[in-house]
Image (tube, rainbow, N blue to C red):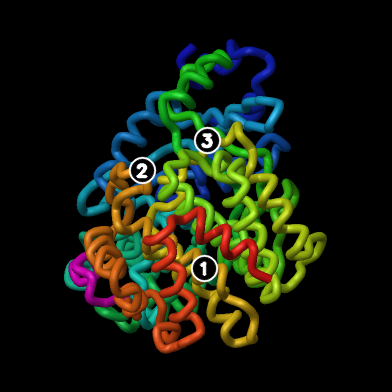
């Protein structure tokens, strides 16, 4: 049965559907980057509030700034912006249809429709999931990259921007000039201090063309930091068939694990939904939560996926079924990551490692090593290298983390140990591939990429460990290197 508002009541009774009147919902949020994660996470929390009769004036308007987002808009529009969420526990499958999204603005080259929607006084939050590498961060300085061609375009043509940030600034200019007031700018990407990073991007771009507007944004907008967590694979033919087997013909269903977490700073300049009533946590300790999650889960994902890719292992769950990779992740996390993390209410870091092992091991979550390994040039500096820097500073071992970096370098050489090709999997793949091949005979060439490693380039302890592991990987293979690490005290 094709999913639509009209067919909701005809779905199997085992499938939960919206109990609220969607025709009475009014918008309060524009979300840019409407992929699977947003629909399984932030949109779900809002849907749960609506199921309780709350937040009826906070409905979501979807948006995108890439040409490819038009196809997603068409799919969702055809089914009245409803989404089927399929929860995959190891021994149980359940589904619900969420309805907190009510529209998706047309995707246009000049972003005029998006700007107009964000300028609507009803919109009080603009949120984003645009990937970790989408914030125009200079990899060397961690400051704003004001040399990117899209940024230069937006600074020169503020009324017809290409980027989400340029569109936000254009809308904020309209609101300021009309006396409407600001909206909260909320990043939902896996970046430590994601609100601070979003503030840097928006205000720096605004200041390139209008310092008065930049000052107004800094004074009136808020940029809460947040930590988001739920493993959500990409949708492919298997997910479409699974939805159909449950009695729903959804053109864009979402599968996800049963775990969700959302930790947010309570800094909302124009109000917010009461997400805490349905499980979100508002706290001033977001940094501790996000450090634990980013370094163990997201960093662990890189450790596992890079090894799996080189060894031709297709999914994260299959990587955890590989005894050596599972033990490698566990040892690195316990010995080299956990010592630098603080406990948070109801969870200590060592227990969190066990939770992540369990979540990674769920065979129902078909999360590919390729998807998880994507964009290593953003994810290693954000998720893995901070633990290396803490280890160096605190005098703890970084041998396993150096091995993880050597495996990433081996992966970027572009072929697996069985000889099959690893297709381009990073925005900077050509550069990484060239350096990785050179590093086969000269490991120091990989570490010379100061934009990723910073001062670690000059640290002999890390550099020597990395070089030793990379030489061993090329001579004896990834499994032999991991085995050596696991045997070491």
Report x, y in % for residue 199.
45, 73
Task: Compute the Cα span from label 1 to label 2.
Answer: 27 Å
Task: Compute the Cα span from label 3 to label 2.
Answer: 22 Å
Q: Which mark is residue 149?
A: none
Task: Compute the Cα span from label 3 to label 1.
Answer: 23 Å
Sequence order check, earlier mark of 1 and 2: 1
In the displayed structure image, the side of residue 152 where residue 352 appears, left or right: right
**Residue span colored magenta:** 145-153
Sequence order check, earlier mark of 3 and 1: 3
Looking at the picture, tell me which residue is in the foreground, 394 or 179.
394
Q: In which quadrant is the C terminus drawn?
A: bottom right
Can residue 12 be seen in the rendering of this structure? yes
Q: Which mark is residue 384?
A: 1
The residue labelled by disc 3 is 366
In the displayed structure image, the side of residue 144 where residue 358 appears, left or right: right
Which secondary structure, mark 1?
helix
Q: Is residue 30 magenta?
A: no
Residue at point 56%, 18% (across, down): 8
Q: Is residue 150 magenta?
A: yes
Report x, y in % for residue 88.
63, 31
Q: Is residue 315 above or below residue 286?
A: above
The residue labelled by disc 2 is 418
Circle 3: is it few (<14), some (14-19), or many (20+) Cα within 10 Å?
Answer: many
Please name which of the two marks, 3 or 2, marks the residue nearer to the observer.
2
Residue at point 48%, 19% (across, down): 241
Q: Is residue 100 above or below residue 130?
A: above
């Amino acid at each position: 049965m094709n999913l639509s508002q009209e067919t909701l009541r005809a779905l199997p009774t085992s499938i939960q559907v919206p109990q609220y009147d969607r025709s009475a919902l009014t918008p309060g949020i524009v979300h840019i980057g409407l992929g699977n994660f947003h629909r399984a996470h932030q949109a779900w929390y809002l849907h749960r509030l609506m199921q309780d009769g709350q937040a009826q004036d906070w409905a979501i308007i979807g948006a995108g700034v890439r040409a490819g987002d038009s196809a997603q808009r068409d799919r969702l529009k055809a089914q009245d912006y409803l989404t089927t969420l399929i929860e995959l526990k190891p021994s149980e499958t359940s589904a619900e249809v969420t309805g907190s999204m009510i529209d998706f603005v047309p995707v246009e080259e000049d972003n005029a429709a998006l700007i107009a929607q964000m300028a609507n006084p009803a919109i009080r939050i603009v949120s984003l999931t645009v990937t970790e590498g989408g914030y125009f961060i200079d990899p060397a300085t961690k400051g704003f990259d004001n040399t990117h061609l899209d940024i230069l375009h937006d600074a020169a043509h503020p009324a017809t921007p290409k980027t989400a940030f340029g569109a936000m600034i254009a809308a904020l200019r309209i609101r300021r000039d009309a006396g409407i007031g600001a909206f909260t700018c909320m990043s939902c990407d896996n970046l430590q201090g994601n609100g601070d990073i979003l503030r840097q991007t928006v205000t720096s771009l605004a200041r390139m063309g209008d310092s008065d507007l930049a000052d107004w944004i800094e004074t009136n907008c808020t940029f809460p930091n947040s930590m988001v967590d739920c493993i959500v694979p990409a949708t492919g033919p298997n997910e479409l068939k699974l939805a159909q087997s449950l009695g729903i013909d959804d053109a864009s269903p979402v599968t996800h694990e049963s775990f969700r977490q959302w930790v947010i700073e309570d800094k909302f300049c124009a109000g917010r939904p009461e997400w805490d009533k349905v499980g979100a946590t508002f706290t001033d300790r977001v940094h501790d939560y996000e450090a634990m999650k980013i370094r163990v889960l997201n960093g662990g994902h890189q450790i596992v996926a890079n090894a799996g890719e080189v060894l031709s292992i297709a999914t994260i769950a299959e990587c955890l079924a590989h005894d050596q990779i599972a033990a490698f992740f566990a040892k690195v996390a316990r010995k080299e990551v956990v010592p630098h993390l603080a406990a948070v209410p109801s969870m200590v870091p060592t227990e969190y490692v066990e939770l992540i092992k369990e979540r990674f091991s769920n065979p129902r979550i078909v999360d590919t090593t390729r998807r998880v390994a994507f964009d290593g040039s953003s994810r290693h500096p954000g998720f893995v290298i901070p633990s290396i820097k803490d280890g160096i500073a605190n005098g703890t071992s970084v041998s396993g983390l150096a091995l993880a970096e050597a495996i990433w370098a081996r992966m970027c050489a572009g072929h697996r140990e069985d000889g099959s090709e690893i297709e381009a999997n990073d925005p900077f793949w050509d550069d990484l591939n060239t350096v990785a091949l050179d590093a086969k005979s000269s490991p120091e060439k990989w570490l010379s990429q100061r934009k990723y490693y910073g001062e670690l380039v000059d640290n002999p302890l890390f550099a020597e460990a990395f070089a030793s592991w990379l030489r061993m990987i090329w001579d004896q293979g990834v499994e032999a290197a991991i085995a050596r690490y696991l045997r070491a005290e």
